[in-house]
Image (cartoon, grey):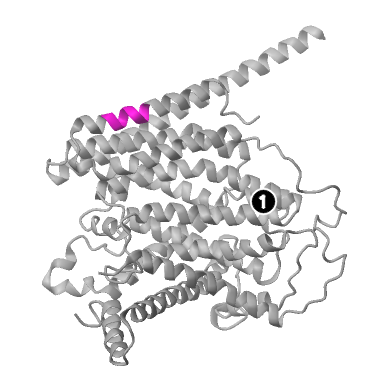
Amino acid sequence: MNFWNDPLHFLAEQLTAMLSRWGLPTAWITFIEFFLGAMALIVFAMALDIGLVWVERKVVARFQDRLGPNRLGPFGLFQPVADIIKMVIKEDITPATADKFLYNLAPVLAAVAVIALWAILPLASTIYGADLNVGLLYVIAAGALGTLAVLIAGWASRNKFALLGAFRMVASLISYEIPMVIVLLVPTLLAGTMSLRGIAEAQRSIWFALLSPLACLIFLISAIAELGRAPFDLHEAESEIVAGYHIEYSGMKFGWFYAAELLHAFTFGGLLAILFFGGYTGFFGLEKLPAFIWLDNPFVQAAVFLAKAMVGYWVIMWVKYSLPRVRIDHLLAFNWKFLTPLALVVLVSTAILHRALMEAPRWQYGMALWLANLVIAWITIEILRVQARRQRRHQRAASQRQQTAQEQTV
Amino acid sequence: MRNEWLYIGVFLIVAIIVPLVPLGFAALVAPRKPNPTKRLTYECGVETVGDAWVQFKAQYYIFALVFLIFDVETVFLFPWALALNRLPMFAVTEGAVFLGILVAGLVYLWRKGLLEWQ
């Protein structure tokens, strides 16, 4: 074992040797190592977050045909620094009627909910915080914590707009959690494990996005809804309820909501990469050849993972800045009448095909799963087309009836 | 053997401390000149009428009930999905039947018109 193959364990061993030479008890050594490991990961996530502020602002500008930040530093790279300084030195106004404790708790909770996800995110096969065997359940739990922060913020502000925003957020959480959890079962059963690292390792030969493109798509949609980004950003709809749940927040408290949202979007891009696009793997066996063995280096893997996460984040941004906001009844109807049944069909078909073709040649297995997805997608589109046609016919008949009725009265 | 859950515990403690650092720093350097007008509830300049903490009809409570049922269902499905490779084909179809019963419930709600926004 050396630094380039397994940096974390190498450093941990060096540290253990050094600290035990100083005569510290083992429990203290473990605690110090865990503390430093957590600190390193969180500082990395925060540094990334600062970078994301710039990326987000620059990309929005490009989508809207503007230049974006371009004054501070080359390409406006120092813009986030100015943003942070502005947030910190801005007066923090707490409404007199607010519930002080909960009001102050909400931004911290929003940040914790996002940072907590980084504890189990495998950056590379040997660079990760913890490799939980119930990783996916942890992801779901941490995701729900973020929504709780929004609900607390909305309630504690004692503002009608904020409360409405919180109500809407809960509506979208209790809807989109369902298809999300159901499609999370697809990588679980394909990989046979709930550990994120195990799922990434299981995709060395083929990505789950190719085996089950529909599951990947449903995960992306429900992830956007869970993030509360446009087109599902009903809880902070600027044109209706001003800023929704964070209307009363200013200064650094608002800053944490903003930072948490950006990091959350990036983290879900990373989860999309891990669950469906192979995570830190991605050379399809090329890394096993002697000439390309360096592709399996943890640092290369981490770069691959971050690049994939950035692509996922970019897709989420692309959706955000291209689509108009949906109405709340459409939001719920889309979930319960379309996404949830579709997710269930995908799950059942994947489970049965996976079990039936387990011993079959791999290409047959892959083709069968892929074709099943294609057939389901085609049937879904046909059903939607028939539905839309029927609706149009009803509308036309209704308007004709109205017309004849009017002519008779005249 | 590393204890993964101990790491998660330490990680969460650090994760709580990190957001508090800039907040504490902001509390030190930010100006503080509150006045009664500034601390009013912000509703776009119009004076606030009534309290926000009122009893409010959550129009989606039926959805919340359905959510609860489906969420509990997925808890049962995770062990099923994990053990799928070792299960006989019969148990796999059994899981599908279990899902089918729940879908029947969803279809029933749909036909009753409870999935419409009221």
Write down the residue under mark 1: A237
Overall secondary structure of the magenta section: helix
* Disc 1 chain ID: A
Residue A206 relative to residue A156: left or right: left
Q: Position of residue B82 (x, y in %)?
A: 27, 45
A42 sits left or right of A232 in the view: left
* Residue B58 visible in image: yes
* Span colored in magenta: B94-100
Q: Is residue B112 magenta?
A: no
Furthest toward the bottom, the residue is A22
* Residue B99 magenta: yes
Q: Quadrant of the C terminus of chain A?
A: top right
Q: Secondary structure at mark 1?
A: loop
Kind of residue at disc 1: Ala
Q: Which residue is drawn at the image coordinates 32% and 61% (left, top)?
A: A279
Above or below, A395 relative to B48: above
Q: Position of residue A306 (x, y in %)?
A: 38, 68
Residue at the location (34% across, 33% down)? A376
Residue A22 image position (x, y, % from top left): 32, 92
- Compared to residue A292, the image places residue B108 above or below, namely above
The residue most toward the top is: A408
